[in-house]
Amino acid sequence: MGECEAIFFDKRGFAIGDLVATFDRRWNKNAYGEAKFVATQSDVAARAGQFESGNFLLLREADLPDWVGYLDTPESWGAGKVTFTAFSAERLFDQRPGVVDKLYGTGGSIFERVIEMANDLGDTLIRPGEIFAGGNSREESFSPANQLYKDIDRIARRSRNDWDVTPSYTNGKLVLEANWYERKRKRIPFALTEGYNMELKENTLEYEGRVWNYVVAYGNASTWSSRVTHEVWDDESIKKHGLRVTGLAVQSNEEATVQAAAEAHLAINKERRRKLDVSVTDVDGTFRQLRIGHVPDVEVMQQGIENGEVGFTAEMEIIEMIYDHAAGKIDVTLKEY
């Protein structure tokens, strides 16, 4: 891999310095990631303002996706070095509580209002980016009891949409673009193959998910008789796994919201899914193909069963990437959907 370009920004988003160092980092689907780096104590003393908690950090490296976030604890000092931690920009929503409000609209339109809520108490540098405004409309409740990050997670799961925050950097100024996707999932004509560009790790393969194939969703009206309900089921899953029924509480009494929540819960839980943890090497430009949401063919020789034989081939979505700069590898978590 090439050298990582690391640019630091103050709380207003203006570039204030750079650093040559080794940066390990993590990307997650619909969640915040993390980065770690080490600086000498003499560098930190000479440029103390650059390393202040809350300053922003943009990491760019050939063949890897950009990483953007801000400095926070933990910060460890010892043996002439300082180990810093940064969290990706999605976590900024966890620093803002909601306000007492009920919003009605699609997941994307509500997300735009959440961005406004986040900036009402002080600029986060987050602005609306690519926003998918389609899908079913729903009602969502907000209050100071929840941080906005938790609200976004709830809305994304109910609407079955994806989201992230990406950097825009021009003329020395950083802007954070909050994106809301119909799906981030993208099929790519590429394969991760055991023994070629992918190595299995210990306890590599898991079958996940408690199966629910009959969902009874109900709204939050004050009495049971006035609560909207909606039932959905999947005949194929019932035949395969037996009948498995669950109730689902929905924080709304809008019929469309309750129905959408029931359908989303069934779609996610009607089958168990394979989850795979592997280590990927940069053979023939493999790293260029690794992005959160990308769906390569995954070819495993020594785990799982398919057609009565050990091993399997499946389309699996990348949901987590952890880059180890020293090892020159990316630990990748993939999941079947």
Image (spheres, rainbow, N blue to C red):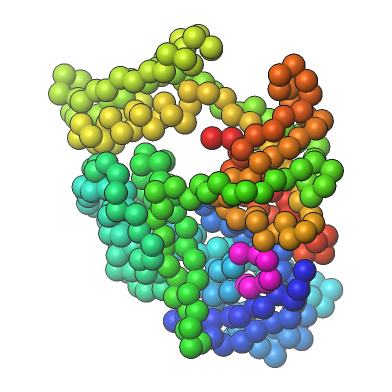
> In which quarter of the view is residue 19 placed?
bottom right
Q: Quadrant of the N terminus?
A: bottom right
Q: Is residue 187 above or below residue 78?
A: above
Which range is magenta?
A: 59-65
Q: Is residue 326 left or right of residue 129?
A: right
Residue at 61% across / 87% down in the picture?
17
Residue at 28% across / 59% down in the picture?
113
Q: Is residue 123 left or right of residue 28?
A: left
Q: Can residue 6 be seen at all in this image of the molecule?
A: yes
> In which quarter of the view is residue 263 placed?
top left
Q: Is residue 74 left or right of residue 129?
A: right
Q: Quadrant of the C terminus?
A: top right
Residue at 57% across / 87% down in the picture?
16
- Residue 285 in the image, given as x and y percentages of width and height: 73, 60
- Residue 197 in the image, given as x and y percentages of width and height: 79, 50
**219 within the magenta span:** no
> In front here: 1 or 117?
1
Q: Is residue 169 above or below residue 152?
A: below
- Residue 100 in the image, given as x and y percentages of width and height: 24, 52
Outermost residue to the front: 189
> In which quarter of the view is residue 2 placed?
bottom right
Outermost residue to the left: 226
Q: Can residue 154 be seen at all in this image of the molecule?
A: no
Residue at 35% across / 66% down in the picture?
128
Q: Is residue 12 above or below residue 235?
A: below
- Residue 211 in the image, given as x and y percentages of width and height: 51, 21
Q: Main secondary structure of the magenta part?
A: loop
